[in-house]
Structure formats: structure tokens, C-alpha cells
Image (cartoon, grey):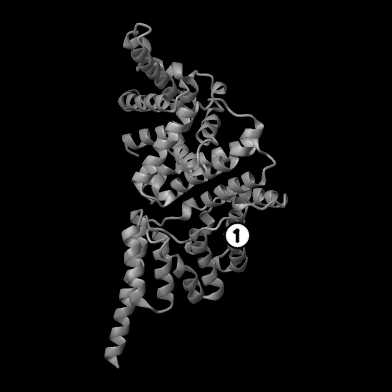
Amino acid sequence: MTELAWISNAISTARPQAMGALLRYFRDLDAAEEAFQDACLRALKNWPKNGPPRDPAAWLIFVGRNSGIDAVRKRSKQAPLPEEDQISDLEDAESDIAERLDGAHYRDDILRLLFICCHPDLPATQQIAVALRIVSGITVKQIARAFLVGESAMEQRITRAKARIADAGVPFETPGAVERSERLAAVAAMVYLIFNEGYSTNSGEAPARAPLCEEAIRLARLLLRLFQTEPEIMGLTALLLLQHARAPARFDDNGEIVLLEDQDRSRWSRKMIDEGLALVDKALRHQKPGPYQVQAAIAALHARAAKPEDTDWTEIDLLYSLLEQMQPSPVITLNRAVAVAKVRGPEAALAMIEPLGERLSGYFHFFGLKGGLLMQLGRGEEARVAFDRAIALANTAAEAAHIRMHIDRLIKDGAAKATAKTAR
């Protein structure tokens, strides 16, 4: 890993805890962000020289707090500004001090930060978007992609959310038990999107973005400790574990995507699968089904299949049907179509997704699936058009390469048919 890569990875991993602590100190999102960004700049200057601190989060909190205090004093002019070396000594001594910070003092800062970003004064879409930006540092472009909206629209959404938090005078304290329960759905959705942002990557970026998945799982476990009898949080945690368990088998040696049915299942993490399956079973015993539990149950069916042909696609189709009722979405219908193709054939699946074309006109996976179904039906020219559109919408090089593989197959099939026709 390059020098810049390990620094970026360390900062990304430390961001939620550092931002949470800085927000506790300054009680202002913009001030906390500015302090954190300044700490990151100093890390880029200091860490290559002195090496990484044993606790990057503590280092960033310490430096960010000093930077924020410096900024406040400059603005207020209520006190003389100390010399730079009194505020922030960037030699090894600072790392030693930072690493002795009492972890217990800010261990719940991440949760506090989540609840503030998911305050009920904000619409749900703004809650999730601002939390993704503030807590995880995901770019506006990446968040917009997750929401299937334009980048400028998402930028405005986040700006409005931050302004609304500031104007509402939101108390920067962890809410009580009742209010925590009311905000739980928004927080769970935000954690799920953090995971998806880390999961939707290519092989080259996977090592650097894996901490997003790991952070989402950590946050889900934290929520589960606070809400131990909530089946939807059990389902969320199970879903993330079962999905992340497949990570080692998702790309081949050339960095290309390996579809679920082609993955080497011996590479799946058995430990994560066992933990996820236990949580699914525990959640379902509560008999209070919800969207995360249903998605986890689908993932569990894949995890329990020793071979692809053992997968219970009929049950998966039924579960997606239930999910459609709970949470109507064209993406859910698109996912269900994969199961329908296995159970009732590609023609039935194609008929199911055709009405989704307008709503998913900018969605890579829609055209990838459509092209695959058309190819199965022998409609090569139409499949080629769909695949070309999928390549244009690909989010990663691996996605584009996967579609090009299908196009190459179409070209070979066409050449073979032409040769056979000439021979006759």
C-alpha cells in the first residue's frame, strides 16, 4: 500500500469517532468538520515523517480540538492566541499524549453523532444524506449515486440539512430511550447505506473501502447492544454480516467481478455466516418481520446453499414478493426478477422488468440484467443495445469489464452462427 493510501485508509476509519468527539467539544457541525479537516491536513504532513500513531482517532481528535480552539479564539478575539507550539506540537510527543486520551470518555461519540444527524426535525432523506457525509466522509457524488439522484440536488439536500440542524438548536446530547427508538429507523438506514458504499466497489479499491463495510457492521453491533430485543436491528446486523462474508470471493485474480453463482464458496467467511445465521433465526423468532429481516433471510438462503444449484429460488421469490409489499421499490422488483428468471424463466423476468425502464433509466444493473435476459432468449441485437447502455452507466471498471465479457460472448456466438450459415 502506498504512503498516501495507508494515511487515507487510517483517516477514513478514524473519521466517525473523531468527528463525534469534535462535535461534543464544539457543538457545531461546521466547526467540527473544519477542525477535523485541519487535523487531516496536519496528519498528511506529520505522519509520513513520524509514522502512524498507535491510535489515529485519538491523534486526530487531539489535533482537531486544538485547531478548533485556535479558530474560535481568532474569531472571538476574547483571549490572546498562544504560540503555535503551545497549541499543537506535531512532533512525536503529541502522539504520546493523544494515545493516552481516555477512550471511555468518547466511546459513545459515534452514536451521539448518528442521532444528531438523524434528528427528527429533518426529512428522512436529509437525515441519511447528512449522516453519510458527516459521519463517514462519503463524497456528495457517491451519496447521490446511492440515492439515484443528481449530484447538485444532493449537495443542496445536505446543505439544507446542516442549516436546519444549526437553526433548530438541536441539543448535542445523546437522546433518551424513547427518542432513540423513534430515530432508530433513520439510523439503521444510514448504517445500511454506509455498508453499501463500501460494498459497491472494484477490486482495486476494495482494500481501501473495506473499512466502510467494517464500520457499518461495527455500528450495527453497537445499535444491537443498545436495542437488544429489536428484531430489525438483528436483521440489519445479520444482513451486513452475510453480505460481507462473501467479500473474499467477489473478484477473480484479474480483478473482475465474480457472480454469486460462480463464487468459490469455500472462501466465504464461515465465522461471519454463522453469526449472521444465528441472528436471522433469533430475529424471526420474534415474529415481527421487517425489511431488514426479509433481506437477511434472502442472504441466509444463499449462505446455506452448499452449491449454487442448491439455492431455494422459489423461497427467495416469495421473500422478495413480501419485501415488495413492505417497501415498494423498482430496485427490489429488479432483484426479484433474478429469482423469477430462475423459477419461471427469462421471458417472465423480462416482462416483470420492462415497466421499470423509465424509473431505472440511469441504473447500471437494470440494463445489465435486461441484456442478460435478452441474451438467454436469443435476442442478441437487443441484448447488445442493453449491454452498451450498461457500460455507459457502469460505476466501476470491474462492472464495465463484466458487461464487455457478455458482449464478447455475443460477438463470438454471432460469428459462429455466420460460419455455420456459410457452411450450409
Q: Which residue is mark 1?
A: 325
Q: Residue furthest left?
A: 422
Q: Residues within 10 Å of mark 1 (few under 14, many from 20)?
A: few
Residue 234 spot, x, y in % from top left: 64, 45
Residue 172 spot, x, y in % from top left: 53, 25
- Residue 399 lies, with reference to residue 123, above or below; the image says below
Residue 197 spot, x, y in % from top left: 44, 46
Q: Secondary structure at mark 1?
A: helix
Res 109 seen here: yes
Quadrant assignment, res 163: top left
Quadrant occupied by the N terminus:
top left
**Nearer to us in this view, 315 or 156:** 156
With 324 as the anchor, is 413 left or right in this view? left
Q: Residue furthest front?
A: 167
Residue shown at the point (32%, 35%) measured from the top left: 4
Residue shown at the point (33%, 71%) measured from the top left: 384
With 44 as the anchor, is 178 left or right in this view? right
Q: Amino acid at mark 1?
A: Gln
Q: Residue furthest top?
A: 80
Quadrant occupied by the C terminus:
bottom left
Residue 330 spot, x, y in % from top left: 49, 60
Res 264 seen here: no
Residue shown at the point (57%, 60%) measured from the top left: 324
Quadrant assignment, res 52: top left
**Nearer to us in this view, 52 or 116:** 116
Q: Total number of numbered labels?
A: 1
Quadrant assignment, res 229: top right
